[in-house]
Amino acid sequence: MKAAHDTLTSARLAVRRYTADDLDLLVRLHTDPEVTRFAGGLLTRDQSEAMLRERILAYYDEHPGLGIWLTVERETGAPVGMHLLNHIRGSDIVQVGYLLYPQYWGRGYATEMGERLLRYGFEELGLPQISGITDLPHVDSQRVLLKIGLHRAGERHFPAYGSAPLAFFTRDAGGWLAEHAAS
């Protein structure tokens, strides 16, 4: 994922870098109340455009190998949402995360690509630790973070994400790789 043409694949999904042409897909995610309920709330088109420019496109060059990527079904090419492996805003902690369009919930996509991103982060990028955060009431996302092999490590507060504490999950490379030997 270090170059603009790179993709990362799992059995059913692929992630690729966003481009400026993908703004409408990002807006679609950010204007869906179901999607944004536990993701900071709705964003306007202008806010989504600023995020695309400042926190997605610029981030690729600033942090090679990390980012927020468009997730698509490999078979159909249909966009299903986004996955990320990036820094928690205002922190040096690298997180794994996702947002999916509601029609793709319950298919295991978050888990499938989340696990693939952990493997990528630990094996290809050599990250020593990867974490995940979610709102305390968002038990579905907490289950996904557990399924992909992160461990609950209490609650943490990150000012960039509001005043409420967040459920915090984390895992070091050695422990995760020992449990998830490549098949």
Image: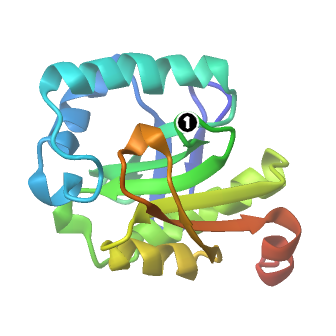
Displayed quadrant of residue 25: top left
Q: Residue 31, position in %: x, y?
A: 12, 42
Residue type of the residue flagged with mark 1: Gly
Q: Residue 173, position in %: x, y?
A: 83, 64
Displayed quadrant of residue 1: top right
Q: Residue at x 67, y 26 (%)?
A: 63
State whether residue 118 is above or below residue 29.
below
Q: Residue 46, position in %: x, y?
A: 17, 19
- In the displayed structure image, the side of residue 20 where residue 126 appears, left or right: right
Whether residue 136 can be seen here: yes
- Quarter of the picture containing the C terminus is bottom right
State whether residue 148 is above or below residue 166.
below
Q: How many marks?
A: 1
Displayed quadrant of residue 135: bottom left
- In the displayed structure image, the side of residue 66 where residue 33 appears, left or right: left
Residue in front for this viewpoint, 168 or 55: 168
Which residue is disc 1 drawn over? 67
- In the displayed structure image, the side of residue 150 where residue 107 appears, left or right: left
Q: Residue at x 19, y 58 (%)?
A: 37
